[in-house]
Amino acid sequence: MWTKLKNLPYIIIYIAGVLLLLLAAVFYRQPLLSVLLILMIVLPFLSVYAARCAIPRIEVDIIPEYREYELPGEVRLIVSVSNPTFLPLLNCRLTYRIENMYYPDGRDRELLFPAEARRNKKIYIPVTVESAGMLRLRAMKVEISDPLHMYTQYIVKSDMYDIPVMPKSNKPEKISLTKSESMEEDAIWAPDGELTMDLRQIRDYVPGDRLKDVHWLIAAKRDELPVKEYERAKELYYMLLPELTEDTLQDTLSTFYGLAQALLDMGETFRVAVYRDFEGIFDFITVEDEVSLKQSLYELYREQPVTDSAAYEKYKDMYPDSIGLVRIRGREITEG
């Protein structure tokens, strides 16, 4: 109904033009005016028919130029328009929405563009980004009108893309933090673990044993290489807890990202506790390289910031015996 009402002013103006031409043809009785009158009566029907045949063949898509962006920067969107028909449709409108999931605004944006005959083209739209987070790009609808604006077809779009924007990296100058002991619920799998000084047994040497574990005093008295086998300790690692509060959100992301990069530079494997505020649970993500670090950020991006985070209190309630938790809130890094 709305699209029909949008065409109504053009229809009224066109009808007014036809009536004026009709009066002129009757008054002046010129053959040329009569021919023009017939053309003006026929043209709207031809325009609508041609548009209804051409519009289904037109393709309009909007995608991000890259899969990921960094701050500070600019996101470029690409609108691709394909019109394989011979009819130029110069009245096209794309409605889309792009917003940071941390700061949803519900505002629709529009792009007016022509779909030129027998041509594929791309239109670039720059979007300035000022905050880290997950941008969500949604194509809402496309409206295409015939050349005379008599008819408009409304095409619903459902395309959606998530575009991560990485935060600035605030790397700490030095790291002096306590590692956490692994628990059954969130242990990092490691085939070796860490050795203690508790001797389990002395056994025969097998290929792959370390020479420093050979018991050389016994080996000097025998024609064999006995090896000292030690107990395995619980694995130790850093447990990072970013607290996503509204007032410190961007600083928290930058501090977490910088600390995580510094740990990876040191060759450390660590874990990130992502608090699901709505469910009141934690997801633990093992980070051992840049790819898994970004994955942990993407999970944080999908959580809405809160006024006052209950993540730390919830963690201590669920794991009262845990030690070495690294809390990140704003620019502060503390141990809890």
Image (cartoon, rainbow, N blue to C red):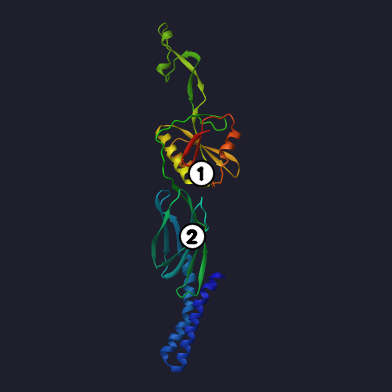
Q: Which residue is drawn at 48% across and 90% down?
A: 23
Badge 1 element: helix
How packed is label 2: few (under 14 Cα within 10 Å), some, or many (20 or more)?
Answer: many
Q: Can residue 301 be seen in this view?
A: no
Residue 11 lies, in percent from the top left, at 50, 78
Q: Which residue is drawn at 58% across and 34% down?
A: 316
How packed is label 1: few (under 14 Cα within 10 Å), some, or many (20 or more)?
Answer: many
Q: Are marks 2 and 1 in contact (CB under 8 Å)?
A: no
Residue 50 lies, in percent from the top left, at 47, 73
Badge 2 element: strand
Q: Residue at x 44, y 43 (%)?
A: 254
43 is higher (above) or lower (below) than 322: below
Residue 214 lies, in percent from the top left, at 42, 14
Q: Earlier along the polypeptide chain: callout 2 or callout 1?
A: 2
239 is higher (above) or lower (below) than 220: below
Between 297 and 329, the one lying in front of the other is 329
Q: Which of marks 2 and 1 is in front?
A: 1
Q: Is residue 32 visible?
A: yes
Q: Which residue is drawn at 43% across and 89% down?
A: 33
272 is higher (above) or lower (below) than 181: below
Tell me which amino acid carries mark 2.
Tyr
What is the C-alpha distance between the residues marked 2 and 1? 25 Å
Tell me which amino acid carries mark 1.
Leu
315 is higher (above) or lower (below) than 121: above
Query: Which residue is the site of mark 2?
Result: 96
Query: Which residue is the site of mark 1?
Result: 300
